[in-house]
Image (cartoon, grey):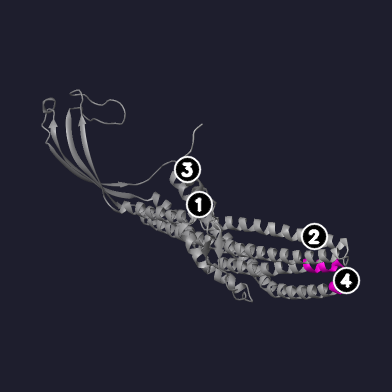
Amino acid sequence: MRTVSIPVLLILSAGRCVLAQPVAPVKLNLKDAEALALKNHPRVLAAQHAVSALNQRVDEAKAAYYPTLAADVTGSQGNPQARIGAGFLTDSRLFDRFGQGITLSQLITDSGRTPNLVAASRLQAGAAGQTAQATKYDVLVRVNQAYFDTLRAQALVKVAQQTVAARQLLADQVTALFNNKLRSELDVSFVDVNVSQAKLLLLQAQDQVHGAFAEMTRALGSQQAAAYELEDEPLPPSPPPNSEDLVAQALSSRPELASLQMSRDAAYRLEHAEKDLSYPTASLVGVGGYMPYIDQITLPHAIPGEYEGVAVNIQIPILNGGLFKARRQEAHFRALEADQRLRDEAEAIARDVRTVWASSTVAYQRLDVTAQLLRQATLALDLAQGRYNLGLSTIVELTQAQLNVTAAEIDNLSAKYDYQSQHATLQYALGALR
């Protein structure tokens, strides 16, 4: 049997103590949470990389404006005086040689196809930029929702803890009265049930806090689980009285709509580029080089070692099996598709704004209603407590009053955080969430 030294045991014990220590909660306010999400969230980073990739397509399309230069090194061996007899028509003579040179090619004109391709690429890159902005807004609205959901869950835990304490106090009082033969066993049973319900509410609230922490971690784009200590945010102002002005604002501000508009414009420029395939293309080609070795013995006439040549080629499409026509028609229908997608998105945005505006208005109105309900429930509990102490009512009336207060407290705190979350969603729908 092996023995473990005392220093090793002390080290292991210290390690267990360190591991057992609770992790300090992460302190955040809403602005810090938003900044952290924009910095770390994988969706934001992926959208930024997509923008960078599409910006490279602009350079790819612009490459046709510039000349291409290639270096060639060629060596060949052939049987003297032979000709190539199969394949494409040719009368090239076979001979031994070795040479090097360069080939220069420059597009003169392709009847406007390259400018249209460059414009389409720029528009697609712009659309990707707007999509990246929309992704940021998606992340921000989820951070806001997770933030206020976490605050609501934590506030619910406090309400549940206060409820347990208040009902436990009443249970202790009723039990003492029962022991002195001043209350019945039925009263004790009712208050015990109320205490158990309050403890169950506390467990459910604690479970909601853990779920809210997990959602908050996801919204921040973090991989490490954490507990959060969040600062409360002031209530935002009331929503505007009219939704149609908000619809107009959203249609001019939403980045998703701007992205689809740019994609639609890019589709029409691509359609023009496909039409340009049917027009002539002119190119300049130049070659030059030197052959240090030529098999002069097998050739009837000496071939100079240096060579150069320049040519202009004009290519005019005549027949290609309907390929260009099909590409032109495909681009046309893609442009029409982009038109309809833009229209559909505009209608969806208008619907979303009207829906969220209505929900925000109702959530704002709930603030006063739930506050009044809490005041009335608290007053009713005070009266029920007094009547019960005087022996004018039963324990059922008192416990029901306690249940009403608990429900009113939950509704009141939920109304506050629901409105803050709805206000953030409305700002997102307007394209104003920054």
Would you say 334 lies left or right of 75 here? Answer: right
Q: Nearer the viewer, residue 426 or 162?
A: 162
**Residue, x 69% and y 57% (percent of image)?**
204
Q: Which mark is residue 192?
A: 2
Residue on which the image places disc 1: 18
Residue on which the image places disc 4: 393
**Residue, x 69% and y 63% (percent of image)?**
160
Where residue 120 appears, as percent x and y from the top left, is 42, 56
Q: Nearer the viewer, mark 4 or mark 1?
A: 1
Q: Amino acid at mark 2?
A: Asp
Q: CA distance from mark 2 to mark 1?
A: 40 Å
Q: Which element type, helix, strand or loop, lies under badge 1?
A: helix
Residue on which the image places disc 3: 6
Mark 2 or mark 4, earlier in chain: 2
Q: Which element type, helix, strand or loop, lies under badge 4?
A: loop
Would you say 359 lies left or right of 15 here? Answer: right
Q: Amino acid at mark 3?
A: Ile
Q: Amino acid at mark 1?
A: Val
Which residues are the magenta region?
388-403
Mark 1 or mark 3, earlier in chain: 3
